[in-house]
Amino acid sequence: MASVSNSVGPPRMWSVFKELFNTVESSISRREAFAQQDLEAALQRHKPDFASLLKNPDKNAADQNLVKNANVNGLPVHGQQGLRTFTSDFISEALTLSDLFELNELAAVDLLRMGEIQQSYFPGFPRGLVAVILYYDGKASLVGALRMLIQARKGRTWALPGLSDDLVATATRFTDQVMNENLVSRILNLLETISVTSELSRLQQPAFRALGPPKHRKMVTDKVTEIQQGLADCLFCWSCQASLSRQEVLLLLGHLARDSSVNADGTLTNVALTLLLALLYSIDVRVLEEEDVEVLMNQLPVISDATYRQDVHREICSVTPWANPGLKAVVQFAWALTLHRLSQYLDLGDMCDLEELLVNAAIEGGLFFFLRTAVIANSGFHEEEYYVRKVHTLITDFIEHMPLKVKELRNYGDETARIIVASQQEGIDPPPNLSRDFEHMLTMIGELYGKDPLNLELALEYWCPSDSLMPPSFPGYSGPYNVHPSQRQISLFKFVRLAGDLLLAPLFVPYISMLTGLANGTQSAHQCFNLLKMNGASAAGSQLSTVSWDHFFMSLNQYFINLRQEAPPTAERIQAYHYYRCGITPQEVDGLRAVLQLITLVVKKDENARIALSENQQWLPLVVLFGLVSCSIPPKLKAELLCTLAAFARTPETGATLWQSMEMSQILQTVSTARGSGGIQVELEEIEARNEEYPLTLAFMELISVLTENPIPAGLGIRIRAPGFQPYIDFLKDSVFLKFTSRAYKKPEEKWEVGAAVLEIFHKLLSAYEVIGEDFLDKPYEVQGEGILAANKPPGFVLMVHMMNESGMLKMILFVLEEAIQAFEKYVPFPGKSALEKVALLCLKMIEAALEKQHEFLDALRQSGASLIVTQMDRLLLGINPRTGRPDYLVNIAKYVAHAAYLPKHALSALHILIGVCQSPLVQTKIVGLFTADEKFSQDLLHGFAMCLESDEPEKVEAKEDYLDIDVSLSQVRNRLREDIVWLLLSTIDHPAPNLAHFLLGFELRKPVDKTNLQDPGVLGCPRTCLHSLVTLLSRGLDSQAGPTCLYLMPKLAELAYHMVYVLSTNSQTYGPTLRYLRMHDFFYRQCQHLPFQSQLSEDSLLMHQSWLLKSVVVELRVTSVNRQRSHAQRMMNLLLSESPDTQSKFAQMDGGFDPDYVTFGDDYSGASHLRSANPAFVDGQVCRKLSSILSSVDFSFGYPGALELEVFSKAAVELLMENCEQRNEQGLALCNVKLLHRILLRECSGMTGAQSAIIARDIQQICSNAVERNAYKETIYRRRQAFDAWRQTIEILLTACPLDLLDGERRQKLLFELLQDLLDKVSKSDAVSELTSPVAGVILTLMAHLTQCFVTPQSAYDQLTDHAQYVSMLDGQNALPGSHDISTILGEVVTGSRTQYASSFQVVLRGLLDHVMRSSSSAQRVRAYLYGALLYYLEIARKPKPLEISASASVERSVASRLANRESEYERLAKENADTLNSYGQNLMDIICRDACDGHDVGRMLALACLDVILTDDYRQAWLNHLSSKGYLQHIIEMFLKDDAQLQALLLPQPEPLRALYIFQSKICMLTKTAATLHGARILLECGVMSRLVECSVFDLRPEPDRAMEGFIPSVLTRYRQQILFPVLRLCLSLLTSFGSGNQFAASQVLKFIVAHADVFMSILRDRHSVLTLESLQELQLTTAVVCRAAVDDGVEEFLLSDAVHTESLGTIRRLQRQMFALLPKYCPSEKQPKRTPEQAAGGLGLDARSEEERADLAVQMQIITEEILANVITLCRTLIAKPGAKSKEAQILFEPSLAEGMARNLRGFEDLTGNLGNNSSRPLNLGVIVYLLSASAHLFMTTLESHKQLYHKYLNVADMSTEVLKEFYVGEKRISDKMSMQQRNQMVSQRLGFILHFKSKELQLLSYVIENCMLILWHHLEFFLVSCKPLDAKTSLLRRYATNQMRKLNDASMQEAAFDAMETGGVDSCVGGLSQDQLMQLKREAVACINETLLKRLEEMEKCYTSGRTRFGFVTAMVRRLRRLLRLHTL
């Protein structure tokens, strides 16, 4: 040890040995594949430690000086750089440790330092006491490692399964090396020096005081005992695998000769027993009979070593007395058998004659008595297989090979028996020196095989199949056996038979005891039954054998007859047996008890024997046994009788008979009589209580326990009393349970045995109770002689009532729990400890069962209305304990969890109680207060929970047939305990703080939970918590290639642990502290290195683990990204998205581990500089991304269980039953309760017998198996869906929340293409399950959305990807507001991916998407909807975006146009390929989409319509349009407008129905609008009568009045009308007019019919009487003016209307509409001082002041643009009317009065006449001054806007140079720039914002330029007319008239005046002229000169120079300015 420790730094005494033990255990016990390399390295390092086993490093003066000066100079510490100083107290303690253990000083320092580090594992212990424990634990670890190595070596006795040949060879080679260095001698010396007593004495010395409280004492004692036993086991294993040498055997013999250690009960200690068996195996040569003799003769020292036999024989036969003579006798006996075997192979010479002498000496030394009392009686003997086998071999070899000696023993036994019989007959005591060896031998054999916990069934060797020994004519013959018994079996069976022949009385009991032991097994019991039956049959005609069933039952019957005749005359004879015992002697009692025990065992083990005996009409065993119970016999005999009856009661039919017999015999008095009480109750209270022994009570409770295994008869006692089980419950409760603690007991353990027996019955009844409402109602029964009585309640009901009240029963249970935990906390052994443990466990189970049923019980009680009063169990448990005055019941229960290491079952039950109590959030605070009131208890409880989780007990795979009730093992209990602790945490973590989970996980309880600063155990006084244990559990093995060891050692616990991590990561209170702590340990990164998890059991077993981990990683990625922890996010992204196979070269370390801190950053995922996974993923032989490999681990194909094929049961009934048995588990999954199903099926078929029962059993087996398979199917599907959902969340977070620059550009595109292709490939498989493929559609939609954004969205705007409005705008572009175009064009350039590069990938994705649509079922509407959405996103990629102009320069515009021209072919090529692919699917795909568009789910219909919308745009062959038309789909959609009309009208109510019809209508109109975008489509629509159907719709006439109320989630009525009804139809009208052109009269007439039909709506809109301008009202007005100005201006249309007499009056309506439009002109004229309300004021008027400043500014800009569009529409109408296409300039209309007064105003609203005309809707035309004013104001606004545009454009080009303060000015609202953003993100946001503003500025410049040019044209036209063509009149009246020719008409022509007024009355459609007086003309000239001045004209010229110089209309403004100047110069002077 010292050499190894000193080789690297200071010597270490604990950690290195613990690591060694873990390495050896991983390799040998756990069989980890990657641990062998570590094992070999560890063995080489620690070889000196094994050679000098448990030798401490020697003390050293130099080291002592170093330690003494460590407070100044410091000492080197392992794992730390530099020197570390220690305190004086620490140094003093280290030196004390050195003196205590004679240990090197530096090693003592390390040991004490480790004690300080490990203090969190030992709360309440100082570091010194912890160091003491670690000292012994290190030694125990070293010894344990050596023991496992010896066990794993190649040997002659066993071979551990599952170990590789290399590992076995390594263990063999190493153990040979260390054992050759006198290790056996070293071990024997250690066993002599190490003892518990000596170690405790040394620790208790006053100089050291190194022994702490009882718990510490127990821990030290356990470790010392473990060391002792480990050393002995090493010798035992070495003896079994490789024989000891001569010298080693002699040493072992000497040690045993000196060993006198025995336990208090006289048995050998475990160490002595192990050494004895080691010696027996070392001299055993039985292996020669099984293997190659020639090879083994050279290997066995007993053969190869010539002096071996002489020396060993001399030592064994030495006359020197041994300290324990029995040991010598056993060794002599074994050596004699060895010599006997050797004599068959060797010439032993003189030693051949010594066998018999040795056997005689052994027998004389009390061999068999010693074996029975000292060896076999040892409590651990039967737990060790090779101990039992060795003794079994000794005994059987003796019987087989020395039959003469056995016969001699029998003869001596018979002689002794005769002497005893003679002495008894003479009434004297037999001689004391009689030889009873044969008697002891028989008893020893019985006890050897009487216990078989390992199910070895070695007793079968004593039995030969009886059929082989009897003739076929024998009545019991059942057929020949295939296997002939061996000679050994025949010899042993002969011994059994002959030993029972002519059996004398003293040998009867031993022989029966031997039979009882040999019958301990199902087959053995059957053989024993046959033997006893054959003995009776063979005695026919001769003397009956005393060992036969006939003799047994005839004797019992005779005793019954005699005792019944000798009964006393009184009725109370049952307790008067001691006065009338003349009929039965004590010897007979012993014999009867032995016989009854044999009957009990055979009947219990063999069902056939049980049935045969109980149905034997000759013996009538049940009657006889019940009769004997009623006789006056000793209580112990009566107890055996009841136990025998209990064995018979295991058969349900027999049990029903016993119930009746028990009622009739009144063993327990259930009917009151005049004679008073009697029966067993009197026996208990008067006899057993006085004797202080209670065998009868225990036996009676055993009988009741067995009887209650089956349902209690409903009519029990119905004829003589009120039926029911109540009398038995009362007796058990009142007479037994409530009094058992106050009675006296000779044996202390019997007290707790009584309590355990009664509680076992109570728990069974309570657990089996099913709450029924009828139980709360009284059922009357008429009893003869008693009248009408209420039937007794079911026993479970009675127990529930007692448990839910402060009854004596509940108080006793809580009292027992308190007493038990106080006894356990003393940590000392005491009599009856095991029985007390059982009582405490049953008490806990009683509370657990009551808690489980209380809610159902309370619900039934409320429904029944009964007057029963009960209290909830959680309230009772939180009540005050009268013994302590504190509410500590729950505290006492919780203490059992802290004792889980010793009492795992108790801890599990206590945990279930805590889970039941903690279900209510209201008690959380109180429970936490109870658990934290006592600091010591709080620490112990926290430590107990944590240690339960850190248990390394591996889980065992359970059988699928878990519907059978099978006892669970201790390992399963510990596993369940760990799992339920995590469930407790999961169930309480979401309760209000502070809750129990917060306490157990270590969060703050006295301040907000999110303020917790989690630390490692021991840091800042932090205790070890459940969180630390979970992290430790999940982190084991992370640095190895195999990954976390918990995945294959304890997969269920690992799944819950990952779930717990996820819940903590998502809980609003705990996510911050948890993620910080996990990040500190690099938890998620190290875990993700091993994804996807690979399972050794099934490919799906670890999917839930993987899903919980991925979901937690998603949260971590989100949090780190939001908090700008860029390095963490980048590191995780690199790991998940890496695709290189080069991993081990970067991670591998020298010792084969992996370095978790190795991190490499890079920008290219395909390069070798990126971080790779420690577990590279291969799919189809190729390395892929980790994300792709994770997806590949989720298999979408799975077979559904086959159909049931039943013979008896109805399939429909079974299916219904299975459905009714379904229950939802913790995950919400509906699974069939197979146990309940199995129980119901058995109950329904309980009466079936014979051949039909076998068929029913097969059907039941098939049904349950099918249910298990269905559950497995559902669970598998659920696991796979969860795994896929976690993968989906990971993808979404990586694409949306992580820093964009870490995955941008081509890398993002490549990733998305790969993922889409992988997904589409997985769903394309024919065997894919729909439950798994359905969620894929949603992921495809998400990925396609991101792929679309990669090709159409600039990186700077990508942060708005998840904005809902953006999705809507992409799905339905028609709803986009003016200016709210796709975000991809915000910055004025089109960002496209390399469409040509990914051309093939595009088509692969499209085909996969279409195939998925074709395969999806029409019933899967959600899937279809997702797929249609994905298709929309895909088709969006091929749509060429419209650039948003951000520059006012023509050069920029040309450059953008050139770029678009260059890329135009790319868009067109992709669109063409898409169209060809879509058309290649033919009419099948068309019909699917068209049918979904016409009928189906509402969302699916809208998306299908949207798909048709986009497809029709790209369908250059118009195949889809022709299909829609030819198949009638388009006609169907149009005809449905009338049906939609009624639904839409209902939706305009204030409280509408669901709005689905509204949005469907909107989608239809949008699709038709896109159809009308082409001439062919528009023609088809008109042919289908689309406008006619719209004319017939009445919903357009129901325009609501504006409402100032705030809008909620549901849009207001007006908003619904506008956005979803009117706006789409107006856009449809515009699309039709645009497609047909301005010259198509038919199209215009169709639209005009719609306008005229709903003229009131248009008139109402054009009146524009809104008090507040809103965005929607402006949009409404803009669309209306656009439709009117384009549809109602053609003379041909008017003529078309006039030709129809019905529509003649419509012309007046058109004229009024035009006049209303003219009236809009002055209202929307801009001005330098805005008189009308601003858009911000409008927003405020609507209550939108809560919007951010940014939103308000955007709203103002949009409203300004729409206002100018309205103005442009009105100006367009004016221009069109004055200059119709094809008309001469002289023939145009004059629309304005010759007055320019408004042109000189600064505010147009200041004119009273104008405002009056507007308000009265006068027919008087506007003055021309309005146009001049509009021209001037527009020019001024244009120049202002242009200057602002220039400034913003300059900032846009220099965003990178802006300061942070300047950048923040652009975002002042909710989306303001945060300090957490990077500079790149800030620049991107500001660039986006500036681009948005510049776009609207550019559009505003375009509109103003358009208005200015048209105003100039209108102004020039009117001025030319008034100043050139118009002649002044004398009259002062102004008239409007038509100029039909170029000649001037007289202005005073009355007829022309009338025509003019008529023209104005009809709307001014005809060209009119106005007459001017001279004064008016002069005034016009003066005003013209004043208004149209040079300043205005120069401004217009400057505008054209700055803005329109590069446009197609360049020069138009200059020409108009030139014409205006000429008019003013020539005609105004």
Image (cartoon, grey):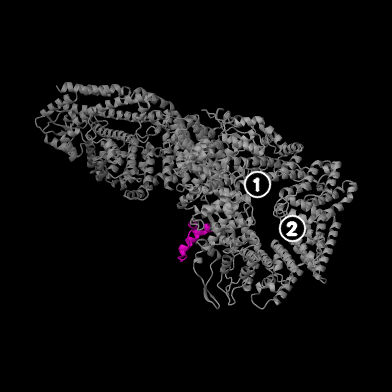
Majority secondary structure in the magenta region = helix
Q: Which residues are magenta?
A: 850-876
Instruction: Indicate left or right for 870 with 836 as reference.
Output: left
Query: In the picture, which quadrant includes the C terminus?
Result: top left
Answer whether residue 1041 is visible to the viewer in this image: no
* Position above or below: 738 against 1568: below
* Position above or below: 1516 against 371: above
Please give the residue where the numbered disc 1 appears in the rendered image.
222
What residue lies at 50% left-to-right and 69% top-to-bottom?
778
Q: Secondary structure at mark 1?
A: helix
Give the amino acid at mark 1. Answer: Asp
Q: Which mark is residue 447?
A: 2
Q: Are marks 2 and 1 in contact (CB under 8 Å)?
A: no
Decide which of 1420, 473 is in the foreground and name it: 473
Query: In the picture, which quadrant includes the N terminus?
Result: top right
Decide which of 877, 1333 is in the foreground and name it: 877
Q: Is residue 854 magenta?
A: yes
Decide which of 1869, 227 is in the foreground and name it: 227
Answer whether residue 1862 is visible to the viewer in this image: yes
Give the amino acid at mark 2. Answer: Glu
Find residue 465 and report its image quarter: bottom right
